Image (cartoon, grey):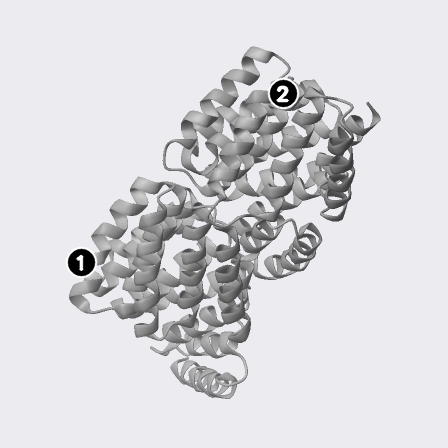
Amino acid sequence: GSLMSQRRQLLHSRAAAWFRERDGLLHATHLDKADDEGAALAYFAAGRAFAAGFHYDDALAAAKRGVEVAITSDVRFSLELLSGDVLRDAGQTDPSIAAFRAALDSAPDDGARCKALIGVAAGLRVLGQADETLATIDQAQPLAEAQDMPLELARIHLLRGNIGFLQGDAALCEREQQLALSHARGAGSVEIEAQAYSGIADSQYMEGRMASAYRNFQLADDIAKTHELIAVQAGGVPAIAHTLVLQARLRDARSSIIEGLELIRRVGHFRAEAIVRLNYSSLLCEFGLPEAALEQAEISGDIVKRIGAKVWEPLVWSNMALCRFHQGDRAGSIAAARKGATMAVETSRALLGAWALGILGLIAEDAKESGAALEQGEAILAERVVGHCHLWFYRYAMEASLNAGHFDAAEYHANRLEEFTKAEPLRWSDILIARCRLLSAHARKTNDGQIRAELLALKTVIEQADLGTALPAIEQALKS
């Protein structure tokens, strides 16, 4: 029998050689059957190729078999890291963290330990666990510095900057992303360079400087396009869409979302998909399509649950509340708005707290409940929060105050929004501020011809900007 097995081994070796340039997986499989020590490394190469093409199941299968046949600890470790990365990209966040923790236990040296720690941290970041992420990269950084690992240092600073974003700390975000950028250049990684530009944009976004943010998001997108980094492009879709909305370019935002969802689906970038569908949902309300909007919010909710991105879940509820509000389902709307606001304050205070409270302030029927929500939202804005909270909170606070006939309060919110956007005025907020002031002035002296003329002019501006939900109150005022 040994002659047969020698012959079989030889045939598999020949087949492996033939497949080397043609099919990475068959190359690895034949090496495996020939009991060749190179099989594990071949599985690693095949797994990486599958992962690069976003074929996650195939990549995982190759990595798993590679771990089983690996002889040297460094090859086994590389395969464990690959598994962790693929699991995270496939939206299996908890298994990914577990894979990196396993890799950490078997790491052959400090450089390897550093890579495994970064993998653990990247998963914790998806879960929105800020403190745990920071603690993990704080362990990784001295290892990367001692081993002189510029690529790993770039990743570490990128992650710390991402956490700065979730915590509403613009200065930390900006500083870390600048460091990530310089290390990425040192390491020759255009991928991290693009992500760092996007991170620098995040820090401007946090300060409400949306035009500057948009330019850097666009720059990151250009780099990604040039180098065919589809996953990086997909990750940038929500930010570009949202900053387009805030420049009152709603049609451009819609096109970027529809194109972006194609990319996101090709890559399977679940976190980006969840956030961009929330953008889409609020956009569809402006276009007068609350049913379609609700569907987008619900799909987003399913994805958020699947990948464990609890930090975004409050906005799912608050968005569903807005959709139901525009559908005329007041009871369902209030229940969802309460849930969104409660969750936001608990789990995503800096990221979403005031935003969700603004929505509750608008939707709540009870004057006391509405007033309390607006008061709490404004208190949170005095803390370190992400810039979009100011913009959306005041948008809803102006509306809620106008609806309640609290014109002084409405004008106060308009002034605060103007103050916040003073460094970089935004077309979106400029329109809403003008609308608030005009509606308030009109309510105080209904038959002023000058105000009427301005309302008519503003109606045209709002129609051109597609801000559909801002129209009814203007039309109502023009009737009176």
* Residue 315 screen position, x and y as percent: 55, 35
Query: Is residue 312 visible in the rendered structure shown here?
Result: no
Asked if residue 109 is positioned above or below residue 333 in the image, the reply reads below
Q: Secondary structure at mark 1?
A: helix
* Residue 1 screen position, x and y as percent: 41, 79
Q: Which residue is mark 2?
A: 334
- State the residue in front, 106 or 113: 113
Corner quadrant of residue 470? top right
N-term-proximal mark, 2 vs 1: 1
Amino acid bearing label 2 = Ile
Corner quadrant of residue 68? bottom left
Q: Residues within 10 Å of mark 1 (few under 14, many from 20)?
A: some
* Residue 344 screen position, x and y as percent: 47, 30
Q: Residue furthest left?
A: 146
Residue occupying image coordinates x 54% and y 55%: 269
Asked if residue 419 is positioned above or below residue 35 in the image, the reply reads above
Q: Secondary structure at mark 2?
A: helix
- State the residue in front, 131 or 99: 131
Q: Residue furthest right?
A: 479
Q: Residues within 10 Å of mark 2 (few under 14, many from 20)?
A: many
